[in-house]
Amino acid sequence: MWNKNRITKLLNIEYPILQGPFGGGLSTVQLTSTVSNLGGLGGFGAYTLSPQEIYDTHKEILLKTDKPYNLNLWVNDHDIIDEKHTKKQYQKAVTAFKPYFDLLNTEIPGPPPSFESRFQNQLQVVFDCKPKVFSFMFGLLSENIIEDLHQKGIVVLGNATTLDEAIALEKTGVDAIVASGFESGGHRPSFLDQAELSTTGTFALIQLTREKVKVPVIAAGGIANGRGIAAAFTLGAEAVQIGTAFLATEESGALQIHKDFLFSDVARSTTLSRAYTGRLGRGITTQITREVLTATDQTLPFPLQTYFMGALRKAALEQQKNDFVFFWSGQIAPIIQYKKASTLMKSLIEEASELLR
């Protein structure tokens, strides 16, 4: 039975289908609980939340479901080197992006405020809340921390974009590895090398990782239906993590225009770019991503570029000039069909069950 394996036993779920834990306000309690209640593993991306907000969100989710869910954080939540470097990059960003601010008749924001990492305080809340599943991205946790999480009864998942990252994660003691192919929407959670050099496709990454690590592999990227699930399982995955298809549902926190675009022809073209946040991520191709490309040397370090581009995004949405807004999307968007998470989940289960009998 495809839905009876190490992952379903480890996570205590009925079906090895994980909903991607979206950050930046895209996750919702409703989406997370819906997926978990239907036998999968709902996910909530909390890297932008304060410790108190994480605690409150956890309590809200527990009111909606008694099933496991996945709380996700970023180990490395900024790329800031020092104040001198930030000032230099700010001037480069002003030069590169001024034409787009001018087109929208919007003032360029001043230098961004200081930023302090939240991760250590956020991690403490994980120990306090004790979610059944905790996943992390953009780095490694020490073996001691992972052992402490295990002592609290928490299952730990790490995210890898290359075989080397998967091997490094396994050495720290994670319970399973999310193999994130470059087809995925959103940020690329690479941590051992530049994200631009860590672009292995999902189906290659599944096979490479399955050959070299002993813990279960969860396939992420380019999967939106039962056929994708069946293909991933055939290549050695024991679960899948689905992002874009769930992001497009009514229950997600994405703007309606974002959801509309995911169901439109514009979703046929996606781009990996640093232009909007300072970290490499995949979204629907825009005029800016076409002209600025990855913008590696023309952006502020993450997350300061997000602040810098905030005024541009706000003006573009208000003026309905959506070609200046970066909407996260994976390459698989053109085949998504369902606008309700429950309908999507049931379709995934039925189609995968038929193909993996």
Image (spheres, rainbow, N blue to C red):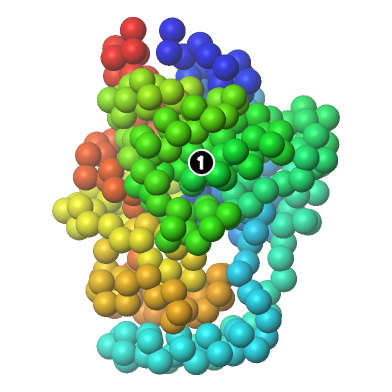
Q: Is residue 343 visible?
A: no
- Please, what is the three-letter code of the amino acid marked with disc 1? Leu
For label 1, the SS is helix
User: Quadrant of the image for the N terminus?
Assistant: top left
Please tell me which residue is depicted at 48% across the width and 22% down the height of the picture.
238
Q: Nearer the viewer, residue 200 or 37?
A: 200
Relative horizontal placement of residue 286, taking residue 200 as reference (left or right): left
Q: Is residue 48 visible?
A: yes
Relative horizontal placement of residue 328, taking residue 171 as reference (left or right): left
Please tell me which residue is depicted at 52% across the width and 37% down the height of the picture.
178
User: Relative to 95, does residue 126 appear above or below in the rendering?
Assistant: above
User: Relative to 73, does residue 110 appear above or below in the rendering?
Assistant: below
Q: Nearer the viewer, residue 90 or 264?
A: 90
Q: Nearer the viewer, residue 191 or 4?
A: 191
Please tell me which residue is depicted at 78% across the width and 40% down the height of the picture.
143
* Residue 35 point in image, percent of width and height: 48, 30
User: Relative to 288, does residue 212 appear above or below in the rendering?
Assistant: above
Relative horizontal placement of residue 158, taking residue 244 as reference (left or right): right
Please tell me which residue is depicted at 59% across the width and 90% down the height of the picture.
87
User: Quadrant of the image for the C terminus?
Assistant: top left
* Residue 109 point in image, percent of width and height: 50, 88
Relative horizontal placement of residue 242, taking residue 150 as reference (left or right): left
* Residue 128 point in image, percent of width and height: 81, 41
User: Relative to 25, does residue 38 appear above or below in the rendering?
Assistant: above
- Mark 1 Cα within 10 Å, few/some/many (few <14, many 20+)? many
Q: Which residue is mark 1?
A: 163
* Residue 291 point in image, percent of width and height: 27, 77
Query: Residue 44 is drawn in which quadrant?
Result: top right
Looking at the image, how many numbered discs can be counted on the residues?
A: 1
Seen from this angle, which residue lies furthest left? 265
